[in-house]
Image (cartoon, rainbow, N blue to C red):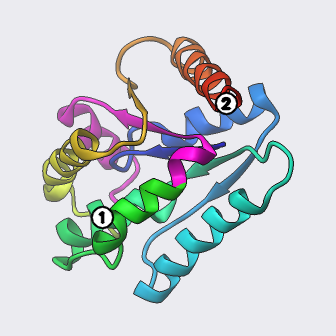
Amino acid sequence: MIVNFIGVDKTGKTTLIDEVALELGWGVQRYRAPFTRKQIQQNVQRVITEHEAATNNYNMLYERWNYPEDLIYGPVIEGKTSILEPLRIAIEHRLLPLGCLFVYTTAPLPLIRRRFKLAKGDYYVPVKKIGKLEKAYLEFLEQTAIPYITIDTDRPTIEENVDTIMLKIREALVCKSQR
């Protein structure tokens, strides 16, 4: 199973993925931008192929895996259409039988901006682009066939958010085992 934590910078992905990894005992792979177009395509191909080739239950948590991150960040930050755009349907067609879940982390924009200031900014994402990124994520989630859960990190406690994520992962694992 592929569980990919996605969302705008400073929305709690790292905190949540670390807690979920502890709970499940699964590995974590972290991806950090920027990547070349070739690296993006190779990363997506490699992860899918690894999961397809696994003979046992191969479960992994990903933080900001290139799919869908490049579909969001490429156009908003770099003004370029993602190399993955023409491959979206094929990628999702391969992901669905593997069991895939997106954990979309969000928070109110004023809180995200405050977190940016506390972290002394970000070298890849200008604060003024946060709203556009948030909008791009929401548009992607409306279109994707991949199941997802939205976690607002401004609301319940970390423990409650982890419990919500764990429930969704367990549901997805049951669905995957019934295929």
Query: Residue 145: horizontal and vertical position, in percent?
Result: 36, 42
Q: Mark 1, mark 2: which one is toward the viewer?
A: 1
Residue tagged by mark 1? 71
Q: Between 119 and 26, which is closer to the camera in this rendering?
A: 26
Is residue 86 toward the left or the right of residue 178 in the image?
left
Q: Please name the residue shown 16% across and 58% down the image.
A: 129
**In the depicted structure, whether residue 57 falls above or below residue 136:** above
Answer with mark 1 or mark 2, whichever residue precedes in sequence: 2
**In the depicted structure, whether residue 77 falls above or below residue 151:** below
Q: Does the magenta segment cover residue 41?
A: no
Dot 1, crowdedness within 10 Å: few (<14), some or many (≥20)? many
C-alpha gap between disc 1 and disc 2: 25 Å
Query: Residue 63: horizontal and vertical position, in percent?
Result: 55, 51
Q: Please name the residue shown 59% across and 15% down the image.
A: 167
Q: Quadrant of the N terminus?
A: top right
Q: From which residue to which does the magenta span run?
A: 95-123
Q: Quadrant of the C terminus?
A: top right
Tell me the amino acid under the disc marked 1. Leu
**In the depicted structure, whether residue 144 falls above or below residue 22:** below
Q: Are marks 1 and 2 in contact (CB under 8 Å)?
A: no
Residue tagged by mark 2? 20
SS class, disc 2: helix
Query: Residue 18: horizontal and vertical position, in percent?
Result: 67, 38
Picture quadrant of residue 176: top right
